[in-house]
Image (tube, rainbow, N blue to C red):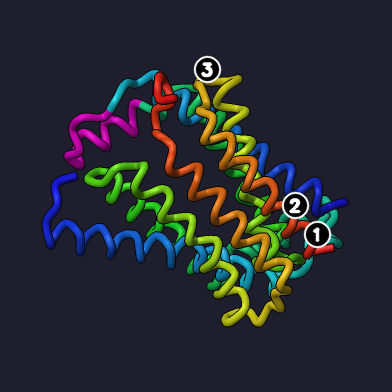
């Protein structure tokens, strides 16, 4: 049961966090200048956005859940199953960021899900 | 992406760093956490002592350093190479993580798990072959 809860936190918080950061970054516009000074400015501007903080907090929850699960499950089980975040990311990006997901990308995600199911069986 | 021997070398080197350091980070975190103690028995009462044991574990910090190395390499390569070229190559990470888990941590990987890993690599490869901007890319 703990395994399922921790996987849920890794995938939901990790992906949710990335979506929030992505939303914050989008609102800042595309980066054109890659000099260290303007990157620093960009990061500092980002830190003023609430979505950035929500994102970082969620990603931290995801990271600590990953640490917790690694303390009692195989790395070769945990990392492949976490690939389910590709599916969560696609659904989230569509719902939360309004992105359109191409048919080929859905196909790739379906294949990832089949692989995750096989790895999950191997861990039972 | 403009071709050239220097650019190719830089790109291959960065992909190598990405495919090695992201899995290495997970393996080091796994090794560190196994010595911290199983979360299967943690209670809320253990929060501070467990956090202290995590933060004082060398393998955890090495794992975080590996993940940061991966992250910097990933950011750098995206500044000159196409995302649709980089992302499929990173699907190899799932194979590397299985190999490292077996040879470094001594985990037993059943043929079924290998099959799952290969299917996931294939799926991630297909995801990566799609355009990073899907608008009008059907």
Q: Earlier in the sequence, mark 2 or mark 3?
A: 3
The residue segment tinted magenta is: A31-45
Q: Which image quadrant for residue B78?
A: top left
Residue A65's place in the image compared with B37, above or below, is above
The residue lying at 51 percent from left, 64 percent from top is B23
Taking depth in this image into account, of B135 and B69 the one nearest to the observer is: B135
Give me the disc on residue A121.
Answer: 1
Q: Is residue B136 left or right of residue A124?
A: left
How busy is the neighbourhood of tag 1: few (under 14 within 10 Å), some, or many (20 plus)? few
Principal secondary structure, stretch drawn in magenta = helix
Give me the disc on residue A97.
Answer: none
Give me the disc on residue A98.
Answer: 3
* Residue B53 visible here: no
Q: Residue B127 location in percent, x, y?
A: 50, 42
How busy is the neighbourhood of tag 3: few (under 14 within 10 Å), some, or many (20 plus)? few
> Mark 2 to mark 1: distance in Å?
6 Å
Q: Which residue carries the number 2 mark?
A: A117
């Amino acid at each position: 049961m703990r395994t399922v809860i921790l996987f849920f936190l890794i995938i939901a918080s990790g992906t949710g966090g990335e979506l929030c950061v992505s939303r914050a970054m989008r609102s800042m516009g595309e980066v054109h200048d890659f000099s260290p000074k303007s990157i620093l400015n960009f990061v500092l501007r980002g830190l003023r956005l609430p979505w950035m903080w929500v994102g970082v907090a969620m990603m931290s929850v995801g990271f600590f859940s990953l640490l917790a699960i690694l303390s009692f499950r195989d790395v070769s089980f945990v990392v492949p199953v976490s690939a389910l975040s590709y599916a969560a990311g696609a659904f989230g990006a569509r719902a939360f960021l309004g992105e359109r997901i191409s048919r080929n990308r859905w196909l790739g995600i379906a294949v990832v899900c089949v692989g995750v199911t096989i790895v999950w069986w191997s861990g039972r | 992406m403009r071709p050239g021997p220097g650019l190719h070398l830089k790109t291959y080197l960065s992909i190598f760093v990405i495919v090695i350091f992201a899995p290495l980070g997970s393996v080091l975190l796994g090794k560190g956490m196994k010595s911290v103690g199983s979360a299967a028995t943690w209670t809320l009462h253990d929060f501070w002592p467990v956090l202290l044991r995590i933060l004082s574990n060398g393998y955890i910090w090495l794992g975080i350093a590996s993940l940061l190395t991966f992250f910097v390499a990933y950011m750098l390569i995206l500044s000159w190479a196409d995302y649709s070229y980089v992302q499929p190559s990173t699907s190899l990470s799932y194979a590397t993580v299985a190999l490292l888990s077996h040879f470094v941590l001594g985990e037993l990987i059943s043929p079924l798990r290998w099959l799952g890993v290969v299917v996931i690599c294939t799926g991630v490869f297909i995801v990566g072959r799609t355009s990073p901007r899907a608008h009008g890319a059907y």
